[in-house]
Image (spheres, rainbow, N blue to C red):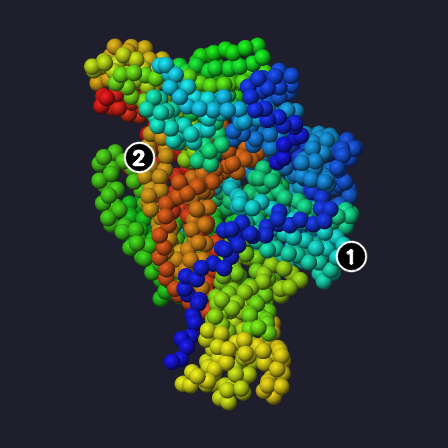
Amino acid sequence: MLPVAARYAGSRVQRVEDPRLLTGQGTFVDDVVRPGMLHACFVRSPLARARILSIDVSRALELDGVAAVFVAGDLNPDVREPWFSTTGKDVPDTPRPPLAEGEVRFVGDPVAVVIARNRYVAEDAADLVDVEFEPLPAFASYTDANGANERIHDGYAANVAGQMGGGNGDKVRAACETAAHVVSETIYQQAYAAVPMETRGLVVEWAGGELTMWAATQASHEVRAVASRLLGLAENRIRVVARDTGGGFGQKTLPLREEMCLMLLARRVPAAVKWIEDRRENLIGAGSARHEHGTATMAFDADARILAVAIDHVQDVGAYPTPWPVGVAAATGLLFPGPYRVPLADWSTTTVFSNTVGRTAYRGPWQYETVAREMMLDIAARRIGIDPVELRRRNMLGADDMPYANPNWMTYDHMAPIQVFDKAIELIDYESFRHDQEVARSEGRYLGIGTSSYVEPTTAAMNHYGSEGATIRIEPSGAVNVYLAGGSTGNSLETAAVQLAADALGADIADVNTIQGDTALTPFGAGTGGSRSGSMIAGAVAVTAQILRERIIAIAAHRLEAAPEDIELADSRASVRGTPAKSLTLEEIARIAYLDLGSLPPDTPAGLEASGRYRAEAPVIWANATHVCTCQVEAETGRVTILRYVVSEDCGPMINPNIVEGQIAGGTVQGIGGALFEHLAYDADGNPVSSTFVDYLMPTMAEVPLIEYGHIETPGPGAGGYKGVGEGGAIGAPPAVINAVADALSPLGVTITRLPLNPAAVVALITEARG
Amino acid sequence: MKPAPFTYHAPTDLDEAVELLSELGDDVKVLAGGQSLVPMLALRLTAFDHLVDVGRIDELRGIRADGDALWIGAMTTQASVERSSIAAGAVPLLSRATPLIGHFQIRNRGTVGGSVAHADPAAEYPAVAVTLDADLETISVRGRRTIPARDFFLGTWTTQLADDELLVGIRFPVWAGRTGFAVEEMAQRHGDFALAGATVAIALEGQTITRCSIGLFGLGSTPLRAPVDGLVGARPADVAGKEIGDAAVAALDGVPSDIHASGEYRTRVGAVMVARAWASAVEEAGRG
């Protein structure tokens, strides 16, 4: 009997990371201990904006156990080239000094860094650094900063970091004049943030002219590249190791200012230095996201078909955004038409500085386009007097429409939005919910349902994201090791790599291991970001495994005296088709390749090791999804209880449905947080007021329902047809939840245009509607 | 997020503890379960030269009937109260308030005395103590004293306890007869401090209210007792919960306002919580 070919991809393989993570044997950056290691603590600005008159570090240096204190004058002049691969060398990036120079621009701005024998002493010493500030008027609000004469950064008039637009304003206005229905609202989204379970952290060690860093990062190779540019040190003198990282969600895509300081001071301290960001630092200093508003306009004909859409978008990027925020804002404008048949569109976006923490990447950084569009569609449906599901059905694109160029010249392909939408509506059983809702309303209970649909450009191939490498070594024992840049922050890249490599080599999955995250061992790669890892790892493993597959088959064919085309690989064994008794194990083949070279066929090289590099086949791979949320709203208290939550998505074939669903669930919970709970708030003076978990509220398992999934699998234009799924949950969830609440409260005449909907906000909306 | 240096003391009996508190003057803090104090120290919101951990003093632990009251030692954990059938039978309000405190991990460490002495105005146990007119037993080198709960709380995180004084235990009166007890709170998430909360205790004879008490928390700088004028002697069927709720919050001032909710919201929802707790307490008493 022939061995059945293993097919691990597509099945719910248990995660290979879990045994170590669930037994506390993971290695996170804070688990790294080096001989004589010292600890860093930053001195941070207590003021939103102030001139630094003087810094006196003498009292701090006198404290027993303090090794050094650095200020801007010590570190900043060492910076050679401060640019990121995503933005490139030539874009005039926004300012990002390692330590504040002359002026502090938000509460939490790092002013000095103390190095001491442990973190306790470092914090004691940080309290002893005397900084004399002269307060300056601060812009806590980006809307106040926008257009103001007073400048947060020299060289940025009106506090605008950049503006972009589509230039179709006149055409859209003309379309609105003759449209049967025109709906326009300003939709505001509050600041919230990634808040990874593991905060940021870095250990740096300079020894023998080489820099070694242990990092909590999504992209070790980018950390290495940044250090190389920053210090003017060749990449082959720098090693970055990231074993386990406890969540990143974009925040750990790029080294921020504190990490730059660690890189810069490494050469000045005669021991390794560890910096572990604490939770308060994370909440005040690791970056904000989502803070923006926009005026959205939609014009419809008498049949509720979309004639034109426009979004005028303004985003807050705080004082020191990372990466360059202007380009990301363009995606918000370009994607605003979403999965709909939109003949005409316009967009503009304005990126504004404020005296708050800088904007950093967060899972679907352009997500506001979906928030604004999907909230607007529900508002429009109520104004027009049409069911919101029917409104979407009339306008949504389907598989038959592909490829489809949206009016902003984004060409969608390999998607089936209406099929995905219909599946979601079927799973939630829309008609019967509407019936339940009617019954509930007659009893004075407010039930609501909301949907949200989006298209998502995953696996974008720009710059360093366009390729991914793999090295596969089959050791002399037949054990397989797959080397990948990785960048897993919990997103199961090890499991995915092992599944894919086992399939590609015909190996038993138990024989396959993977090593990721160490730049000294792994090929260059861009890490986790842009929902790229699944597709790109699949490509890298496929092109590399193919080299070894051919060699394994050549050896087996030679030894088994069969034609290469008759050799089958499965379960770590090469067999002759139709003659299963004639076979060699992978171990036997590996032994030949390394130890019994005389048995190799002529012209077959020794060893079973190969490297390959996959280049993305398309500039972007489109994924899409529909979220549906049902909820109950208690009008007296404003409490929103989510009843059911369905996500129907199309990320192509799934490497592992468990991983896909885990990604969707995680993102969805973050989006629920954004809709109902999370708020990185500042007071009018620019003081952060949600700097601990007492005030920064994330949803817990008590607030989140079981999420139900629907999968549509339209293959994309890349390896295995896989598409990205990392970010979508966080994009789709907020408007689905908001629309559900708005639907629940629609009998009261409530219109929702602001997030988050905490209980007090819900009660205020009801009170306002009742007049 | 590391505390400033402190000296840690762990006395094993009451005498040693009060001696330490007396000697160390005003730069000492009693450490109970640490669920509020330790994060505040770690955030350097507060700092003390000395911490006296009273967790090893057996006399501070226990739940037992004591005449017409239930005595609970200050260092008894919230989890112990949650599991105690004696507490559930004698002081149902205390038992019912317990699961609303944080999460089970917090209740495994958090103590009854710690919660009361910390005096967070939005916390459950101080409100229960005030609602039931509990007596707080304290000790210092100057001797023992009993402080009525209604006099104990002075403001947010401030109480009648002197710097050298230790809370030993709390006597919760046991209400006899046909009684009903309820606690209701509005928190944004399960386990959060209440935005507004209410406790109701009621006793009936026949169809007449013979005793009742309404507590409010999260609605001022201390837990509060709402006026109950005209309720004793009335029949529950003749009074509307909504009116009781509205009356309970009518005279409030200084209701806290923050990023989570305005004072106006808290007041309004406080009335709703009173009405709900009232309905549930009346229902229970009526069954008795």
For disc 1, the marked residue is A209
Q: Residue at x 51, y 15 (%)?
A: B138
Q: Chain of mark 2?
A: A
Front one among A433 and B279: B279
Amino acid tagged 2: Leu
Q: Is residue A83 above or below residue A192?
A: below
Front one among A627 and A346: A627
Amino acid tagged 1: Gly
For disc 2, the marked residue is A748
Q: Is residue A188 above or below residue A422?
A: above
Q: Is residue A10 visible?
A: yes
Say few, some or many: other residues with alpha carbon within 10 Å of mark 2 (under 14 / 14 to 19 / 20 or more): some
Q: Residue at x 39, y 57 (%)?
A: A649
Q: Are marks 2 and 1 on the same chain?
A: yes
Q: Residue at x 33, y 19 (%)?
A: B201
Q: Chain of mark 1?
A: A
